[in-house]
Image (tube, rainbow, N blue to C red):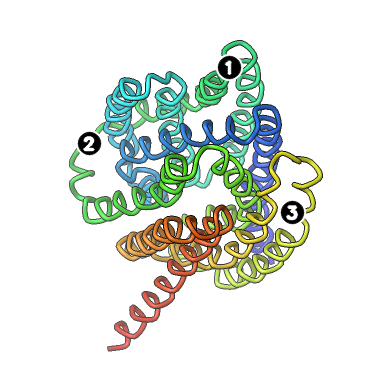
Amino acid sequence: MESFWNKLKDIASIGVADIAAAGISAIFWFYIASTIGPEGYGQITYFISIAMLSSTIALFGASNTNIVYTAKKIPIQPTLYLITLTSGIIISIIVFLIFVNVGASSLILGFIIFSLTTSELLGRKLFKIYSKFILTQRILMVILGISAYHFIGIEGILIGYSLSYVPYTYIIFNSFKTEKIDFCLIRQKLHFMIPQYFQTLSGSLSGSLDKLVIAPFFGFALLGNYSLGLQVYALLTLLPAVVVKYIMPQDSSGVENKKLKKMIILASVGIALVGFTVGPIAISSIFPKFIEAENVIKIVSIATIPFTITHVYHSKFYGLEKSKNVLISTICYTVVQIIGILVLGNIYGVNGIAAALVMGNLASMCYVLLADKFDKSNSKV
């Protein structure tokens, strides 16, 4: 019984912070959307997607690698930090030269710092400290983002957003002080890191490529409506994502948490129903300019269920150091979604694009279920 309450407290430490942070973030982005309209919101989403994809290229799969090996008490952090920060600076300069956008290039470094440090905190199971940093960053994002917007314009939102990650640099400096850089550790773990890198890159493509495709093919206004729907989708998948953050270091330590996994999958069904029924009503009354986002929310709400199932299995595969399964799963998602966007988007517009997201999640879920079943059958031989 005591173990159950300890688990509940740890999940609450992550959950309260992530839910509060998501609430702050949602209010901020909803305010920005209502202020700049669908086209401006589409532009912001476009540059954030560029920054996310660029940061993932620079990270070399360091985030989940950091969680897994920190949980296993292998001091890999400072070496990962040196490699990824160096590549991040180079890539941010390249992005600036291409797009001449200070906000997008600086946000790349912000995302890298955030990914590295939060993964270390989760790997060390320092859930309360993680919570404090998350909330601080969100509050700074609102203050700096809105302030910079009124002084600079749309690009100021991105600059303020990137500056909100500055407090996380403390964790990086502390890691360099307490642990030694050891490239031998990296070489020893390449069997995990290489497929992990391609998996996170594929995951970033699945999270960013849709926006990068939609903007040139369908325009910023349609992207703005789609992105507002995704903002609601992010809220719907928040609770499953919180639980996965908790169980990933547990899986890496050999603790399975089977009951907890079943509970969160069942909860995702209820969350999907709430999103399908309540979400469109809320959006139509608050954001009259985003009329097309109503149907988007209905459609993407369905994806909450396969999203949850997929990520529960991803956590299991990470713990077993079978990141190849996660990579293939994410590739399935990306390929199916992008094909869906190009085909269904031309036929059904934004509704077809939303349906492509659901199809991508279903494809990814089917793969992880088959992969798990295949692994079990092999283990019996």
The picture places residue 340, in percent across and down from the top left corner, at: 44, 61
Residue 252 shows up from this direction: no
The picture places residue 69, in percent across and down from the top left corner, at: 36, 49
Outermost residue, front side: 347
**Location of residue 376 by image quarter:** bottom left
Q: In this view, does 6 lie to the left or right of 313?
A: right
> Which circle, 2 or 3, is nearer the viewer?
3
Gap in Å between the C-alphas at discs 1 and 3?
Answer: 29 Å
**Picture layout, residue 41 above or below residue 124:** above
**Location of residue 267 by image quarter:** bottom right
Query: Which residue lies at the image location 44% right of the left edge and 41% below the top edge?
Result: 120
183 or 354, nearer to the observer:
354
The picture places residue 242, in percent across and down from the top left corner, at: 59, 52
Q: Name the residue under label 1.
A: 153
**Location of residue 253 by image quarter:** bottom left
Which of the labelled discs sits on residue 280, or is there none? 3
Query: Which residue lies at the image location 54% right of the left edge and 67% below the top edge?
Result: 306
Q: Name the residue under label 2.
A: 182
Instruction: Say what amino acid the circle numbered 1 marks.
Output: Gly
Q: Is residue 96 left or right of residue 283?
A: left
